[in-house]
Every structure is written in structure tokens, then in C-alpha cells.
Image (cartoon, coloured by chain):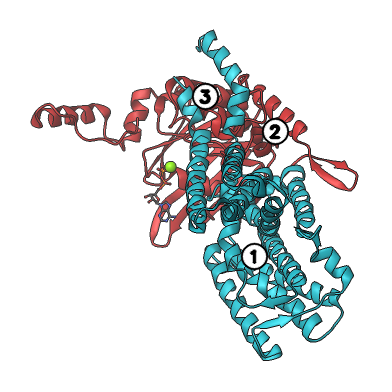
Chain colours: A red, B cyan
Amino acid sequence: MTERPPILELRDIDKSFGPIDVLHKISLKVHEGEVLCLLGDNGAGKSTLIKTLAGVHKATAGTILMDGEPVEFNRPRDAADRGIATVHQFGGTFPLMSIGRSFFVGVEPTKQWGPFTVFDRKKANEIAVKAVQDFGITRINDGDRLVGGLSGGERQSLAIARAVYFGARVLILDEPTAALGVKQAAHALRIVNEAKRRGLAVIFITHQVMHALAVGDHFAVLIRGSVAADFRKNEKTREEITDLMAGGESMADLEASVEGYVESHEGRLPPTNADE
Amino acid sequence: MMSTEAEDRRRVSGAFGRLARRPESGSFIGMIFVYVFFAILGGKVFLGAPGFSSWLNTAAEVGIIALPVGLLMIAGELDLSVGSVIPAASLTVAIISGHHDAPEIIGILAGLCVGLLVGFVNGYLVTRTTIPSIIISIGTMFGVMGMTLGFTVMIAGSTGVFIVPDPVTKALLGQFVGGMFQVTMFWWAAFIVVVYYLLHISHYGNWIYALGGDRESARNAGIPTRRLTIGLFMLSGFAAAFVGVGQVLTYQSAQVLTGQAFIFNSIMCVVIGGVLLTGGAGSVVGIVFGTLTFSIVNQGIFFSGLDPNIGSVIIGALLLIAVLTNDSFRQMAQSYAAKREP
Ligand SMILES: Nc1ncnc2c1ncn2[C@@H]1O[C@H](COP(=O)(O)OP(=O)(O)O)[C@@H](O)[C@H]1O
Ligand SMILES: [Mg+2]
């Protein structure tokens, strides 16, 4: 098969913070029009991995390749210039700015008015609103609204629409659905599909297996900083993936131990954190 | 799905709601309130030219400084050094053109350069260290104060220096129009226009809001955050120096220990005007309303027959109310979505 090289490839990436090894020999590939789901429990190293991809951290060892060529990211701007866009859990970072203004931060459209340069608010608003509406968010129709006034899903969509508008080729979504309700999460997943349909490579970080299965083409499970499994769609069942994420401990065992706890603690459930 | 009734209600309340949510609406209401309050107590004198000119003169001086201090606050920074830049600039003018008799234009330019320089030092230190700007500008405030005192005593032999400006300079920068209205208020108007252009018309405004919203993201978005921060500090140094220059030409003398009141007064104008202390939001119109509100209270108290100390209490109360409403504005903007979701 003569396939085009993957947009983004990691070869044997290691990352340590001083004496703390967080990532070990991570190798992954993602192609255009493909969703790679990065699964893993809290603390597995997912955020560290994507920060390395986004130029926030520099890998301790290993190579990052784009279109088959080795690249080096010394700062977030380097990754952004190559078309890698990261969308964080809460979407935009400027909640007190209007939709149009935040969309164009740093690249404001201007018009000339005599000797004066004028921020073209109308144009900024129109483009921003059109870009989100193209992603199916028709409820956003006023570019003057504050980003902070949008729902979580809408903010995610805005951030994704912005990345796509400015030519992102790889979209990294860090737990986009974690803070969303069921309906909003479904919405965010539709947007992931839309980005994929447009030919972007999407790296989708989550610890919700259902969400991953809904959009993923390719899955990688991270356990304590290593890729514990790397498989494609339909190669594993939901139960198998859940077991993998729990670190090999099967879900059935886990359930049994929970039952044991309940029995020995007068019917109370074990304390959990609110994840999942 | 939202019911159509609720949808209608939302549309009707939309325009009004948006206006009510703008923080400067609050400062406008505050301004009208204090004006009416002192109009009732102060009567004809307050409503006439004497009252009018006294609060407008106060507003013009503090207002020139409040504008760039407001821009800095929107960008997430504080500048307390303005308090010592004012006398530093005054004394520079008085020493160069009064004590030494050099042409006034040289003294004035040197005075303004003092402000630009202090601003540059502030901005440089803020962008090169992780020390908060409040600490850095307190440091430069004391540094500038000490140097001003030292040099003045060394050169002029006293802590006050006199100058008799020539008529043209006096008319431009230090005149009382009609015997009451300081020419400074026209300069204030010019500053308002320039800062309005910067914040609300040019694309720099977007940079300033972004800087105050999230410095890191602003930098990653390609905004030259360092140059912008240094530029904003230089603007506030320049404005403070400008007020200092105006003062020395108006009162024909410069004292080392004037100007400290401007530190808190300018911040109060800005906060009463709806600028968020934590940065990211605010407007020029709001800052102007805040400045007028502050000045009306500050001067109105003398026309009211009330104990002048009550004026400070009123300003303190206004400040607290402003901070609370500004904060609830921010919360509303950020949690609006959560409330709307079923
Ligand atoms: N800057 C850092 N310095 C030291 N340790 C870190 C740093 N960032 C992350 N870690 C550690 O790396 C591990 C993985 O964290 P993270 O990547 O945030 O996991 P995840 O996103 O999968 O929950 C954690 O044990 C965390 O404490
Ligand atoms: Mg994480």
C-alpha cells in the first residue's frame, strides 16, 4: 500500500520532568481525515503528551514528524504555525471578549480610514458567526455576544471553527466532553466528525470510552506514560477497552471488589471522584 | 427545547439586558445619583459655574491619568508610580526653565521624557520579571520620589522651585479660561479621543483586552505582549508627566511632595467606571463616567455643607459598590451559559 505519510507521527517520545518520567517511548501516527482517540486514566500522561505536541513542553527524547519530515517545536507558536491547534476543555480563553473579537485575537481584520487603522468589527463578527454556523451551531448569530455567555459546547465549537478557519491541519481536543452534559457532549462529538469530514486529523483525548467509540478511527490507550494498546475501530469491544484503561484489572473484578466493599461497609458505596 | 414564550421573553429582554449588563451603565447611574445628591444639598452654587468648574477641573487632572491607568488595568496591570511622576515632571520643568531659565519648551519636553522613562522602566521590569506590577511600580514610585527630592535639594537648594511661564505656554497648558475653567480640560478631551481610538477603534484594543484576559494565550496568538505592556506603561508615565507639567505652569511652583493623592484617585476613577480589577474588561466611556463621579463627590462635598470627611466615606462606598457590580458582571458573563442549559 503506497500511503501518504501521516500528517503527524511520534517516534519513541520520552518526557521527564527532572527525575519524574512521565512519558516512555510513545509512538503514534495520525492521518488526515482520521480521529485518533487517546484514552487513559487520570494521571496517565495524556495532557503531558499533547502539550509536547503543542510545543508547550519539549520532548526529552524521540522525534516528531509532520508529513514525514522531522520537526522541532520550541514554543507553542512553532506548533501553531505548522497547523497544530489545541482546543482546551473550556474552549476559548477570553471569556470576557466578544465572539468576533476573540475569534481574531492577534490577526484582527482592519480597514483604513484616512490615516487611521480601524478594527473591522463588522467583518470580524460576520466571519466568526459564519464559521461557527458552518459547523452547525446556528444558535450563534450575534458576533457581539461575549464568549463567556456561550454554553460549553458552543465555546468548543467556536474554538474548533476558529482553528479550522485559520488553517489548522491537526486538531487536538483535550477532554472536550468531560465538562459537558449528555446533549452538549453529543453536540461536541458531531463537531469532531465535521472536522474529520473536512480532512483534519483529530487527536481526541478522553477517558469516556463511549465518546471515543462514537467518533474514533484509531485508538491508543495510555497507561502510566506508555502506549499499552494501539488498535483500530472494531478491533476491540467496549468492555475490553474499559478493562485496558483500568490497567489490565478487568471491570468484572472491579465490580466484584465494589460489591465486597458495599457488603463490608453497611451498604455504603466506596468513595469515588466524580469522573465518569 | 425552549418554549416559544421563554424565547420571546428572552428576545424582548435581550436589548435591555445587554445594556444593563454593560458595566458602564452602572457607573452612569452612579454619576447621575451623586450629581442629583449634591445638587440638592449644594443648590445654586453647585449647579452654577463655580460648582461646575471645580469638579470639572478636578476631573480633568485625574482623568488624564485615569485613562491610561484604566488601559493598564484592562491589560491586567497596575501603575502606582504616577504619584511621583507628577512632581518629578513638575520639578524638571521648574528647574530647567525656572531655576536655570532655559527655554520652556525644553523644560516641558524634558518633563514629559521623565514620565516616558519611568514608564519604560516599569514596563521593562514587568515584562522581564515575574514580580507583579503593583510591587514594581511601588518600587519605582519611591525611587523616583527619592531622586526628585535629592536632585531638587542638590540643584535648587530647597524642596520647592518657582517658575514664571511666558504667556503662550501659560495659555496652552496653565490657563484658567474665564477665570475658572482650567485649560487642562481640553487636554483631557484630547486624551479621551486618543485613548478611545486606541481601545475601541483600532485593533490595539483587541490586544489590550486579550492581554488582560490571558497573557499566555495572547502571546501565543502572536500579540507582541512585551512591547504592548511597555507601551502602556509609557503612556501612563507620559500622562502623569503631562499633568505635572500642567500643574507647574498653572500654579507657577513645583513641590516635591505633591501627587500622592493621584495614585488612589486614578484607580478609584477607573474602578468606579466599571473596569475589572482583574483585567480583561472595561471601557473608556466607563472610565470617564467614573472620573466624573469621583470628582463630583470630591468637590461637591465642599458645596454641600456636610463634613468633608463624609466625601471620603461616599467615595469608599461607591468603590465597594463598583467592585461588587463589576465582579457580578464578570460572573454573569461567565455563568450565563450554565444557567441557560436545562
Ligand atoms: N510539570 C510537571 N512536573 C512534574 N510532573 C508533572 C508535570 N506535569 C505533569 N506531571 C505528572 O505527570 C503525570 C501525568 O499527568 P498528566 O499528563 O496531566 O495526565 P492526564 O492528563 O492523563 O491526567 C502526573 O503524574 C503528573 O503529576
Ligand atoms: Mg489531563
Seen in the picture, residue A186 relative to A208 is either above or below; the reply is above
Residue B12 in the image, given as x and y percentages of width and height: 60, 17
Corner quadrant of residue A103: top right
User: Dot 2 corresponds to which residue?
Assistant: A165
Q: Regarding mark 3 in the picture, which secondary structure is present there?
A: helix
User: Dot 3 corresponds to which residue?
Assistant: A189
Q: Is the residue marked by circle 3 packed among few (<14), some (14-19), or many (20+) residues within 10 Å?
A: many
- Depth order, front residue of A100/B282: B282
Residue A17 in the image, given as x and y percentages of width and height: 43, 58
The chain holding disc 1 is B
User: Dot 1 corresponds to which residue?
Assistant: B123
Q: In which quarter of the image is the C terminus of chain B?
A: top left
Q: Regarding mark 1 in the picture, which secondary structure is present there?
A: helix
Residue at x 52%, y 27% (from the top left corner): A153
Disc 2 versus disc 1: nearer the observer: 1
Q: Earlier in the sequence, mark 3 or mark 2?
A: 2
Residue B16 in the image, given as x and y percentages of width and height: 61, 25
Dot 1 amino acid type: Gly
